[in-house]
Every structure is written in structure tokens, then in C-alpha cells.
Amino acid sequence: MTDAEDVRRYADAILAMIKEDQDSGQVPRDVLNWDELDASVDTDEYWRQAQLTSGTATAAALRDTVTGEVSRRLTRSQAGPWNVTWTDPGGRSVDIGRTIGYATREEAETVGERYLTDHGGAYRVHDS
């Protein structure tokens, strides 16, 4: 079990570094999780700068927990209030698009229209 204060402290430090990298253009502003982040930059550099220890089971557990917290916060930072539900011609409803929602109703409508054009059925845009 990792200490919640350590998790918060490391996540805060790493998110501050990510924000700096977003401001400089190194990291896309719409990055949603650690894997997407790792595709943009060497994430090991964040661990080095945060001075997170390594080499023990406790350090590995802390790193995993911090990674999860950073991903959770990145996802939450991109969340929008709009979701889209598509109903296939057989009547089965499915949430489509970004699972965290869309920032604007127009963006959600565009996704719904695309599904309607490609697959038939119906769609509904709704608040999250």
C-alpha cells in the first residue's frame, strides 16, 4: 500500500512538468493518459525529475499508483459534459466516441451524425 500523500505529491509534480511541456508544444494538450503521454515524450524523464526512487517493490507500487493518478487527472481534465448514445438498427444502444465525453454539444453531434451516416440506426446526445 502506498501513502496517499506521496502519491499526491508526486502526481502534482509530474502534472506540473506535463503542463510545462504542453505549453512548450512537446506534449499535446489533449493527452488522456500515461500511454498517450509516453508516445509524446520520454516519461522516464518525469520520474527522474520528480526524484522517485526505484528498484524496490515499494517503489514500483508507488510508481504504478502515481501513473494511475496522473492518468486519472489527465482524463478528467479533458472531460466534457456531452455524451453520445448510438442505437443500432436492431435496437441495441451503445455509448460511442470518447468515454469521457465531448467538450461541446456540436462535437458530440458530429460524432452522432457520423455514426448515423456510416451505420444507420439513431443517436442521442445527452449531458454526462
Image (cartoon, rainbow, N blue to C red):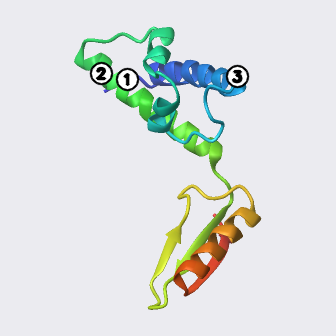
> The residue under label 2 is which amino acid type?
Ala
Front residue of 107/15: it is 107
Which residue is farthest front? 118
Q: Residue at horizontal 66%, vertical 25%?
A: 19
Q: Nearer the viewer, mark 3 or mark 1?
A: 3
Question: Is disc 1 in contact with disc 2, using a CB cutoff of under 8 Å?
Answer: yes
Q: Residue at horizontal 42%, vertical 18%?
A: 44
**Helix, strand or loop at disc 2?**
helix
Query: Which numbered disc covers residue 24?
Result: 3
Dot 1 corresponds to which residue?
63
> The residue under label 3 is which amino acid type?
Ser
Dot 2 corresponds to which residue?
60
C-alpha span from label 1 to label 2 = 5 Å
Q: Residue at horizontal 43%, vertical 30%?
A: 67
Q: Residue at horizontal 45%, vertical 8%?
A: 51
Front residue of 66/124: it is 124
> For residue 17, which quarter of the picture?
top right
- Tell me if residue 105 comes above or below residue 8 in the rendering: below
**Helix, strand or loop at disc 3?**
helix
> For residue 29, which quarter of the picture?
top right
Question: Is disc 3 in contact with disc 1, using a CB cutoff of under 8 Å?
Answer: no
Q: Residues within 10 Å of mark 2 (few under 14, many from 20)?
A: some
Residue 2: x and y, percent?
A: 35, 24
Front residue of 110/52: it is 110
